[in-house]
């Protein structure tokens, strides 16, 4: 439900509000200066050459690092929005009033414009690169911006705005920066990967070119508002401190249809959608930038970084809701270990498959006009199907074993920390090991390690060859990882009777986080 509130002049012109506007101005200026500056530097180094995967990675990382710093420096003053779409999404959820949000917009747009004018002056009149769609229509560009901005604003809600976040807010800037990096690797060659009206408005002001600028307002604002509605109504509105979120559901319904379970399925659907959209989209982007080559080192690097950052964000934002599986193999391993019931695991699988398929349908719509087939996992000619299955099993073993170690409190992992700090670090190492596996085996099997990651492209493209490899290998590898961890590394021991639930332990409803 929309929770818009107009606000009052007294609040919007208070000392703390004025400090917030200044913080938004400075942080947005620094973010846009670094982001646009990286694009100018690329043009200077290549003498105006065409964008290639290596340059796309550099520009994406510059945006991620700059946004991480910008959000961190403004978080305790203004909330660290740096983006009119984020401000609008938070206004829809009732986290900021309309009047104050308008002044946030003014500060953000001024910061972006001043940054670009300073860049133009300090680079001796270099042309300021503006956002524009390439190879797709403007309507398709709007759809692309809607998808990637929804992922960004949803991440902001999950890590910074949710009242249940606890100390997640301390690592929220990192998650936000990572999802922006991953989205730029997906959308950069198509729409520029703006996700931020201010980021597109500033260069347009400095260049005096507003052609197509509406795309970068319509898409992000639609998805920002939608993310506010979805997360606010599904996850925040149902939260009541000290009570289980079961009041509106008959107590006799099965656990797998309880409100926490339904929210968990939605979280798995969205996180899998986000990850597959980034993973497959980054591959499409790399192919677009290197049309004469099927694969090269820089393309593999781009897709590996995108998948590492994308998986980190996908796991992190779902961890406290569903456990952040994002992978049928991970769910299968946890079912073997008794951390999730079989009926719930089946619904997790369905959510993951639907999320992957829907992500690929959206990507297919956006890129269909270019006659590019949706990339599916392929086995190198040097390998047999059996060998590819073994390799996928080994890679999945590495990922799932990392998931188990990261999420097992018995190991005292990460300094013995529990909760949000361990969750963030666990998600980071899972993303890192996935990126490493893609670099190691991407040219041999595609390094799927995730049946949903392979299933979605196969459904949309209609090519199911070798699908057995991407199911059998990961499932066997996941099962072995679960058994090794449970039977050999940390054998299960009887646990003492749980203490009576307190308000603190019930802050996430009845959902138990069982993975990173």
Image: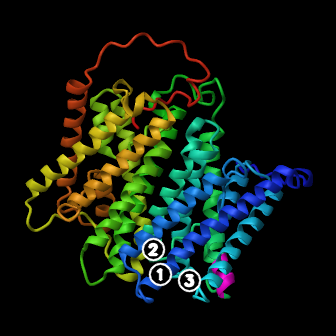
Question: Residue 318, relative to residue 417: is it above or below?
Answer: below
Q: Main secondary structure of the magenta part?
A: helix
Name the N-terminal-most of marks 2 and 3. 3
Q: Residue at 44%, 77% (x, y): give it.
A: 189
User: Where does label 1 land, which residue?
Assistant: 136
Can you give x and y, in whole percent of width and height, for residue 447 in the image? 24, 57
Q: What's the mark number on residue 163? A: none
Please give the range of residues in magenta: 202-207
Disc 1 crowd rating (10 Å Cα; few below 14, some 14-19, many 20+) is some
User: Where does label 3 land, which residue?
Assistant: 129
In front of the other: 390 or 411: 411
User: Where does label 2 land, which residue?
Assistant: 366
Give the spatial CA distance, label 1 vs label 3: 18 Å
Give the spatial CA distance, label 1 vs label 2: 7 Å
Q: Is residue 28 visible?
A: yes
268 to the left or right of 488: right
Can you give x and y, in whole percent of width and height, for residue 103 in the image? 80, 62
**Looking at the image, do the residues carrying marks 1 and 2 touch, with CB atoms under 8 Å apart?**
yes
In front of the other: 162 or 228: 162
């Amino acid at each position: 439900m929309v929770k818009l509130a107009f606000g009052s002049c007294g609040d919007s012109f208070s000392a703390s509000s004025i400090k917030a506007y200044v913080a938004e101005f400075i942080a947005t200026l620094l973010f846009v200066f670094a982001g646009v500056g990286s694009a100018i530097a690329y043009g200077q180094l290549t003498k105006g050459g065409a964008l290639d995967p290596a340059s796309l990675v550099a520009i994406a990382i510059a945006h991620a690092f700059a946004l991480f710093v910008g959000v961190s420096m403004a978080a305790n003053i203004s909330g660290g929005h740096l983006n009119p779409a984020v401000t609008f999404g938070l206004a829809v959820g009732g986290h900021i009033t309309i009047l104050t949000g308008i002044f946030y917009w003014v500060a953000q747009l001024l910061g972006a414009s001043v940054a670009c004018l300073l860049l133009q002056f300090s680079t001796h009149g270099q042309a300021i690169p503006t956002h524009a769609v390439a190879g797709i229509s403007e309507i398709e560009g709007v759809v692309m911006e809607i998808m990637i901005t929804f992922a960004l604003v949803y991440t902001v809600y999950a890590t910074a705005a949710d009242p249940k976040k606890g100390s997640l807010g301390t690592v929220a800037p990192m998650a936000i920066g990572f999802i922006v990096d991953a989205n730029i690797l997906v959308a950069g060659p198509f729409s520029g990967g703006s996700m931020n009206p201010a980021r597109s408005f500033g260069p347009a002001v400095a260049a005096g070119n507003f052609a197509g600028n509406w795309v970068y307002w319509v898409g992000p604002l639609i998805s920002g508002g939608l993310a506010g509605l979805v997360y606010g109504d599904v996850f925040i509105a149902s939260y009541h401190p000290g009570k289980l979120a079961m009041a509106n559901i008959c107590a006799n319904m099965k656990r797998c249809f309880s409100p926490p379970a339904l929210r968990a399925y939605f979280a798995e659907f969205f996180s899998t959608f986000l990850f597959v959209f980034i993973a497959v989209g980054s591959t499409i982007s790399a192919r677009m930038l290197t049309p004469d080559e099927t694969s090269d080192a820089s393309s593999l690097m781009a897709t590996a970084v995108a998948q590492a950052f994308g998986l980190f964000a996908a796991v992190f934002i779902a961890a406290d809701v569903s456990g952040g599986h994002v992978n049928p193999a991970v769910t299968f391993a946890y079912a073997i270990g008794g951390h999730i019931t079989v009926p719930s695991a089946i619904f997790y699988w369905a959510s993951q498959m639907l999320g992957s398929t829907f992500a690929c349908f959206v990507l297919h719509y956006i890129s269909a006009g270019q006659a590019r087939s949706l990339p599916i996992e392929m086995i190198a000619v040097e390998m047999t199907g059996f060998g590819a299955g073994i390799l996928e099993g080994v890679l999945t073993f590495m990922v799932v074993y990392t998931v188990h170690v990261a999420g097992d409190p018995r190991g005292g992992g990460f300094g013995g920390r529990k909760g949000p700090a361990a969750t963030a670090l666990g998600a980071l190492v899972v993303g890192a090991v996935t990126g490493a596996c893609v670099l190691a085996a991407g040219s041999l099997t595609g390094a799927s390690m995730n049946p949903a990651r392979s299933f979605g492209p196969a459904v949309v493209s209609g090519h199911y060859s070798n699908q057995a490899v991407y199911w059998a290998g990961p499932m066997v590898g996941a099962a072995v990882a679960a058994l090794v961890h449970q039977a050999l590394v940390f054998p299960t021991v009887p646990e003492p009777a749980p203490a009576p639930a307190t308000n603190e332990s019930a802050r996430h409803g009845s959902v138990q986080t069982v993975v990173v």
